[in-house]
Image (cartoon, helix red, strand yellow):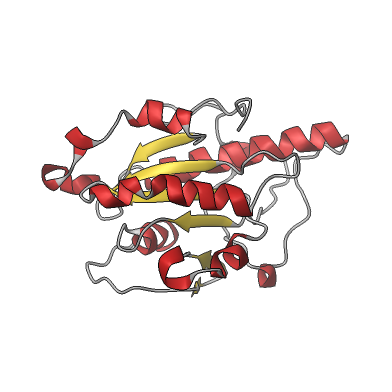
């Protein structure tokens, strides 16, 4: 079977310092840096365009530009800072208000409880049950992640991409244009190329992925 490269624009959103850039670097380059610096805009890598969005408070209406044509999102909070979890619904609401699928549904979003390697310093007892929380507020899945230890980074993105692909296949069937591939998006338009993910070679189910919900979108999502 001929393999086709897919280009997907995926947002990585959340408060400052939750580890968004570290997650991208871990996934794309398999590296982690202890040094933190606030960034805005786009980070370029070899044949990869990373859209790493920053806070609404600091950059205001720029969010609409970043969100345009996105097909999925990772919403990230820091397990050691309760305030970043309390901001999750603000980010999800901002996302849903500025980008949607052609059928009006929200784009697939996965919730990441990042920095789980610092659990001993974290706020786990103060957090609600993330399984129930993610379902109630329309996330397609959730994961405890660590960019430092490379915990669940690939699993979370695989979960998101599978949901994105399910939505695209469902739309193609509805439109009567079902196909294994879609037209490639011009990289100049601002897409995130997700490397080393071959949808055709992945199993439909995610073994050991208790945080990833069924691929079928829920009513009202």
Q: Between 7 and 18, which is closer to the camera in this rendering?
A: 18
> Quarter of the image containing the N terminus?
top right
Query: Can residue 54 be seen in this snapshot?
Result: no
**Which residue lies at the image location 66% right of the left edge and 54% below the top edge?**
5
Residue 21 makes an appearance in the image: yes
Task: Please indicate whether residue 204 sits to the left or right of residue 87 in the image.
Answer: right
Q: How many marks?
A: 0
Question: Toward which corner of the image does residue 10 lie, by quadrant?
Answer: bottom right
Q: Of all residues shown, which one is farthest toward the right? A: 176
Which residue is painted at 73% across and 46% down in the image? 2
Q: Using the image, determine if residue 42 lies above or below residue 198.
A: below
* Relative height, residue 151 to residue 209 (above, below): below
Quadrant showing the C terminus = top right
Q: Tell me residue 80's x, y (percent).
A: 20, 49
Residue 25 in the image: above or below residue 46:
above
Residue 112: which quarter of the image? top left
- Is residue 168 toward the left or the right of residue 144 in the image? right
In-image side of 64 versus 136 (left or right) = right
Which residue is nearer to you in this view: 204 or 125? 125
Is residue 154 found left or right of 179 in the rendered image? left
Q: Quarter-wise, where is residue 25 in the image?
A: bottom left
Residue 102 picture location, percent across and down: 75, 44
The outermost residue toward the left is: 120
The residue positioned 58% from the left and 47% from the top of the image is 96
Please tell me which residue lies in front, 161 or 92.
Answer: 92
> What residue appears at the point 62 percent right and 41 percent down from the top-left corner?
106
Percent of width and height locating residue 36:
26, 71
Percent position (x, y) of residue 160? 52, 42
């Amino acid at each position: 079977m001929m393999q086709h490269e897919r280009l997907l624009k995926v947002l990585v959103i959340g408060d400052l310092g939750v580890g968004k850039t570290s997650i991208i670097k871990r996934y794309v380059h398999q590296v982690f840096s202890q040094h933190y610096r606030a960034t805005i805009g786009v980070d370029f890598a070899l044949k990869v365009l990373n859209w790493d969005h920053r806070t609404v408070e600091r950059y205001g209406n720029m969010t609409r530009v970043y969100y345009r044509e996105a097909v999925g999102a990772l919403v990230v909070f820091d397990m050691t800072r309760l305030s970043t979890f309390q901001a999750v619904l603000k980010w999800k609401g901002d996302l849903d208000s500025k980008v949607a699928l052609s059928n009006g549904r929200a784009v697939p979003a996965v919730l990441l409880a990042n920095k789980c390697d610092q659990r001993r310093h974290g706020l786990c007892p103060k957090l609600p049950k993330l399984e129930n929380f993610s379902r109630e507020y329309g996330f397609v899945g959730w994961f405890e992640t660590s960019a430092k230890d490379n915990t669940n980074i690939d699993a979370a993105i695989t979960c998101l991409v599978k949901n994105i692909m399910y939505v695209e296949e469902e739309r193609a069937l509805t439109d009567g244009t079902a196909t294994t591939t879609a037209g490639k998006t011009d990289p100049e338009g601002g897409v995130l190329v997700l490397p080393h993910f071959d949808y055709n070679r992945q199993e439909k189910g995610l073994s050991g992925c208790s945080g990833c919900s069924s691929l079928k979108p829920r009513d009202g999502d």
